[in-house]
């Protein structure tokens, strides 16, 4: 069984990134493309190829598709957020604020 807190954190971060995608799609999608290229070059992520392929397809569909996937609940959304290529989309402060809110909700 998946850790509920971990899933909440992952979904909350995904939703925060989705908001960034909606606010500044060109910058965030470009960041996703750059990160995706780096991720594909990492031998440790060789087995994640199918998820990276899907991220590439979704990024190419545009910001609405990316925001939807980042916010998707359920197994598919969970699996895709595990390999989301949007590191750097949130500042450290933004990320910590999201995580603090999750911990407040579960406390």
Image (spheres, rainbow, N blue to C red):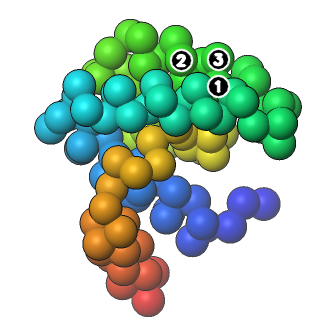
- Write down the residue under mark 1: 52
How far apart are labels 3 and 2 at the CA level?
Answer: 5 Å
- Write down the residue under mark 2: 56
Q: Are marks 3 and 2 in contact (CB under 8 Å)?
A: yes
Residue depicted at x 28% and y 22% = 64
| Quadrant of the rendered image containing residue 101 | bottom left
Name the quadrant of the N terminus: bottom right
Circle 1 sits in a helix, a strand or a loop, which is it? Answer: helix
For the residue pair 48 and 44, the one nearer the viewer reads as 44
Q: Crowdedness of circle 1 by 10 Å Cα count: few (<14), some, many (20+)?
A: many
| Residue 65 appears in the picture as rendered | yes
Percent position (x, y) of residue 41? 72, 30
Image position of 86 (left or right of 62): right
Percent position (x, y) of residue 20? 24, 43
Image position of 97 (left or right of 103): left
Q: Are marks 1 and 2 in contact (CB under 8 Å)?
A: yes
Q: Crowdedness of circle 2 by 10 Å Cα count: few (<14), some, many (20+)?
A: some
| Residue 74 appears in the picture as rendered | no
């Amino acid at each position: 069984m998946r850790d509920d807190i971990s899933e909440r954190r992952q979904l909350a971060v995904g939703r925060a990134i989705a908001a960034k995608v909606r606010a500044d799609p060109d910058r965030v999608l470009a960041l996703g493309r750059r990160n995706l290229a780096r991720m594909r070059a990492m031998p440790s992520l060789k087995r994640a190829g199918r998820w990276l392929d899907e991220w590439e397809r979704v990024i190419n569909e545009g910001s609405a598709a990316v925001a939807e996937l980042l916010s998707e609940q359920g197994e598919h959304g969970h699996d895709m957020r595990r390999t989301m290529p949007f590191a750097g989309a949130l500042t450290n402060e933004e990320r910590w604020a999201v995580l603090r809110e999750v911990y407040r909700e579960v406390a």
